[in-house]
Image (cartoon, rainbow, N blue to C red):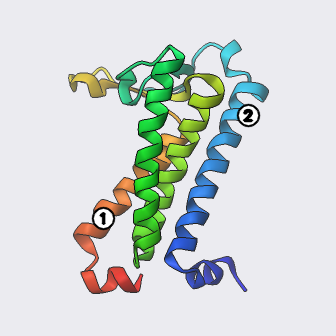
Amino acid sequence: MPLKTKLAALPPRALGLAAALAALAVDQAHKFWMLHIFDVAARPPISLTPFLDIVLSWNFGVSYSLFPAHETAARLVLLTVQGAIIAGLAVWMVRTGSRATALALGLIIGGALGNAADRMTRGAVADFFYLHTSLPVGPLANYVFNLADVFITMGVALLVFEGFFLPQERRAAG
């Protein structure tokens, strides 16, 4: 049976769980490769395009390094908040009848778990992709992220797409 057919046969919560585990595994494998095999820390920034570089940046906070947590107690607070959010998303994922919602939530959960794993094991989140511009767009001119952030963004985009473009009846049918 082809993979597409197997995925189509999964109930929403199983699809969401598979997405979460896949996002977590890909994120952690990529971080391991970047840190221990590619050794990004020993390299100067690598320019991929005029607006995208490969770098190593340790994020001790949340998005845009807000709420930095260098001490253990502060990291535990961030992890507790992150865990509560992940738990809430997991409850939503288990209860939904929509395959699109379950997939989106699974991507968000997997990305969040990947960043939480970094915070627990490394004390900070490892970011590698530096998106930058000289355009006057304020704080969005510079953004450093990782694959976990990509999965979270994809999940949020899918939730928004579903909310705007899929009729209520089709959402449940998946």
Q: Can residue 60 be seen in this view?
A: no
Residue 138, picture quadrant? top left
From the image, tell me which residue sits under label 2: 33
Outermost residue, right side: 37
Point out residue 131 in the picture as x, y percentages from the top left corner. 42, 29
For the residue marked with disc 1, what is the amino acid?
A: Phe
Point out residue 162 in the picture as x, y percentages from the top left corner. 31, 69
Q: Would residue 29 be found to the left or right of residue 172 on screen?
A: right
Of residue 128 and residue 96, the one placed in the foreground of this image is 96
Within 10 Å of disc 2 (Cα), the crowding (few <14, some 14-19, many 20+) is: few
Q: Would residue 80 be found to the left or right of residue 139 on screen?
A: right
Q: Is residue 33 visible?
A: yes
Point out residue 158 in the picture as x, y percentages from the top left corner. 37, 62
Number of numbered discs on residues: 2
Tell me what residue is drawn at x 55 percent, y 45 percent: 113
Secondary element under disc 2, as helix, strand or loop, is helix
Give the distance between the C-alpha atoms of the residues marked 1 and 2, in whole angstroms. Answer: 32 Å
Tell me what residue is drawn at x 30 percent, y 20 percent: 134
Residue 121, picture quadrant? top right
Of residue 89 and residue 1, the one placed in the foreground of this image is 89
Secondary element under disc 1, as helix, strand or loop, is helix
Q: Residue 119 carries which label?
A: none
Q: For the C terminus, which image quadrant?
A: bottom left
Q: Are marks 1 and 2 in contact (CB under 8 Å)?
A: no
From the image, tell me which residue sits under label 1: 161
